[in-house]
Image: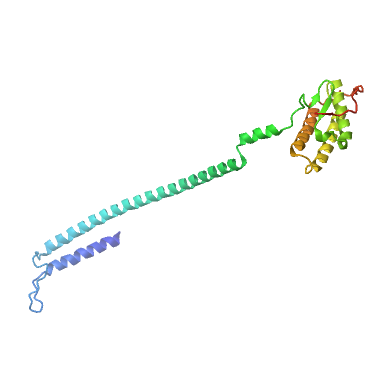
């Protein structure tokens, strides 16, 4: 701050000295006149004019300083707005990207609600009236499972369901026999998939799944009495 004052004082002193030296000058005979020759050349007026310049310069400095401060504040405000806009744009882009990825996922994988319904629809169901005689427990086997290759497993399953019809529930031993027999039949059926009609294969596979599911739904630890031999023992019913 003191350096500025010294500079202003030096300028004022120089102006005053110039005012005192104002004279008409003849340069090279051409009558060149000092541009300050029309001013008063007294020291007092020169001092006054110099002081006025000091005041004017100080006012101009303050004005320029204020304008500079305003410009700096405006630049800072715009910088803050740009930073805010950058952050907001980044989050907007991320949200758009997530929405696009979710839409693509739903398009490729399907709606989650529809997927849930599909899964529910594919769950094994209990045996229907077209699959079994509930009074006797006799099963109506699909065509592919009626061959002699499946006779040992069919017998085990039929005995278990006959016992269930007699007791009202299936014993744990009978359920394990059904589970083991259906697994063997499914594995054997899988080996014939290339040689049988697709619709017949699907029908046989779903039938075995329903048999295992239905057996599991009626398991009881107290159902242990074997059913009396039926007159149709050894006969396979095909639906």
Task: Please state, as top left, top right, bottom left or bottom right, where the C terminus lies in the image.
Answer: top right
Q: Residue at x 43, y 47 (%)?
A: 85
| Front residue (pair 97, 65) | 97
Foreground pick, 20 / 187: 187
How did the renderer colour the structure?
rainbow
Residue 157 image point, x, y percent: 85, 30
Check the picture and name the quadrant holding the N terminus.
bottom left
**Residue 121 seen in the figure:** yes
Residue at 62%, 34% (x, y): give it.
114
User: Eyeballing the image, is 107 above or below 173?
Assistant: below
Q: Is residue 136 above or below residue 112?
A: above
Compare residues 211 and 1 and report the one nearer the observer. 211
The one nearer the camera, 183 or 84, is 183
Residue extending furthest toward the right:
229
Q: How many marks?
A: 0
Q: Is residue 60 above or below residue 90?
A: below
Q: Is residue 203 above or below residue 25?
A: above
On screen, residue 155 versus residue 239, left or right, reads right
Q: Position of residue 237 (x, y in %)?
A: 84, 28
* Residue 221 visible to the viewer: no
Residue 137, located in which quarter of the rendered image?
top right
Residue 2, percent across and down? 29, 60
């Amino acid at each position: 701050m003191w350096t500025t004052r010294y500079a202003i004082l030096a300028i004022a002193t120089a102006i005053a000295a110039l005012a005192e030296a104002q004279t008409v000058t003849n340069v090279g005979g051409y009558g060149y006149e000092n541009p300050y020759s029309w001013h008063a050349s007294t020291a007092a007026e020169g001092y006054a004019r110099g002081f006025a310049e000091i005041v004017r310069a100080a006012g101009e400095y303050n004005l320029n300083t204020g304008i500079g401060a305003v410009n700096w504040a405006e630049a800072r405000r715009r910088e803050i707005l740009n930073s805010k806009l950058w952050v907001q744009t980044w989050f907007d882009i991320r949200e758009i990207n997530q929405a696009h990825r979710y839409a693509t996922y739903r398009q490729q994988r399907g709606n989650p609600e529809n997927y849930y319904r599909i899964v529910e629809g594919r769950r094994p169901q209990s045996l229907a009236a077209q699959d079994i005689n509930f009074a006797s427990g006799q099963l109506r086997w699909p065509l592919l499972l009626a061959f002699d290759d499946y006779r040992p497993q069919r017998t085990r399953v039929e005995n278990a369901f006959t016992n269930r019809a007699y007791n009202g529930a299936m014993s744990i031993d009978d359920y394990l026999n059904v589970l083991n027999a259906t697994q063997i039949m499914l594995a054997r059926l899988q080996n014939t998939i290339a040689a049988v009609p697709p619709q017949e294969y699907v029908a046989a596979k779903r039938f075995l799944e329903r048999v295992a599911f239905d057996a599991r739904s009626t398991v009881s630890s107290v159902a242990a009495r074997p059913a009396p031999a039926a007159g149709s023992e050894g006969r396979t019913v095909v639906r």
